[in-house]
Amino acid sequence: MLGSTLQRALVALAIWSVLTVSGITAQAPQPCLVEDGDDTVLVGPRVTQINFEYAVRLRNGPNPLDVTAVEIFTGRRLGDTSISLHRHDAGADLPGAPVVLGGWWMSDALGWQGARFLFTVRIQPGEVFWVVWQAASGAALPVARVNRVTGDVHRTRQNFSRGVWSAATREWDWKIRLDCGGRRPGQLLTLGGPCGTGGVSPQLGSRQPVPVIGQVFELDVTLVRPGSGAWLGIAVRRGRWGGQLPPVDLTPFGAPGCHVGANLEQGILRIADASGGATVALGIPGQPALVGATFWVQWVSLDPAANPLGVLTSLTGEVRIGN
């Protein structure tokens, strides 16, 4: 962690200058569907060790929704996950045809996580639809609450599309929200995945679920080589990096399996401690205009022993500031 108030202030100033000089403008969030949407930490119903799929049936309210992203309150596991919207097969009471699919690498930070879609999906007033969450290789830790009477109707199946849906049950209340139109403040989405072998593979984590104006947002890295340099890159756009659109594959440069996920313009260097970890505390300025602003972060481990290029990369975090 940063060792002084002065250091915190300098980091806050760096973040403020990156966001303002680059012309980021915040977009106000717009009302959307939220199912049990508070941030109360609830109990996960199961942690699977196989490919598992959860389908939750929801009904829209009286207004049409133009959905651009879906999030689920989860964490404490790492792995490939995807989330999709499906029409309702009323005859079978099952998820029908898929409409849109998005994916992300789940962070171990407990909070709202999900995927932004490549196009907007219209959900009509009163329409019944399904949110289907696929968790690969045990990366499932749904955060839900026991409610066997009025919980959200849901089904489960193993092995994804090759499995058979379970009977419908109301065993759990789920925490799901749909992002519509404007940006939703306060969010950390994870993109891509880390690289490395032999227990050395930079892992991005956060000590707070979301960044909030006027507060410190701490970003950790773990599983890097003790004593090595750990650089937290910061970007305000995912624009071209080295002339290429991200994610930029570093394999041709000597770092197989590693990627740069954003146009990393500024950064903060740390030295990994004896456990292979480091932390940067970002001071988010208390400026209301920053609510909804987005920037990207990625840890780069400076490790000459790792590969010919001498770097390893974490997944990329898309950070949206809240209030």
Image: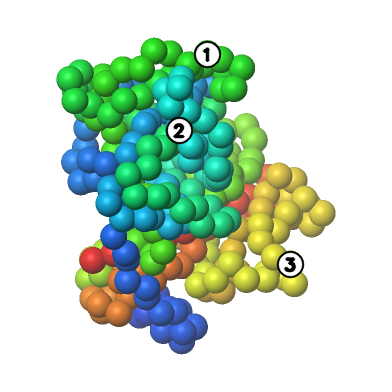
The residue pinned by badge 3 equals 244
The residue pinned by badge 1 equals 164
Report the residue at 39% width, 66% height from top.
182
In this view, the residue in front, 191 or 2, is: 191
Amino acid type, residue under disc 2 in the picture: His
On-image quarter of the N terminus: bottom left
The residue pinned by badge 2 equals 88
Report the residue at 27% width, 42% height from top.
35
Q: Find numbered disc 2 in the image and state the secondary structure of the residue it sits on.
A: strand
Q: Find numbered disc 1 in the image and state the secondary structure of the residue it sits on.
A: loop
Q: Mark 1: few, some, or many residues within 10 Å (few <14, many ≥20)?
A: few
Q: Position of residue 267 (x, y in %)?
A: 50, 69
In this view, the residue in front, 223 or 167, is: 167
Mark 3–mark 1 distance (CA, rounded to whole Å): 42 Å
In the image, taking residue 200 as reference, residue 72 lies left or right, namely left
Disc nearer the start of the sequence (3/1) = 1
Q: Is residue 323 above or below residue 165?
A: below
Mark 2–mark 1 distance (CA, rounded to whole Å): 17 Å
In the image, taking residue 33 as reference, residue 303 lies left or right, namely right
Q: Position of residue 44 (x, y in %)?
A: 29, 26
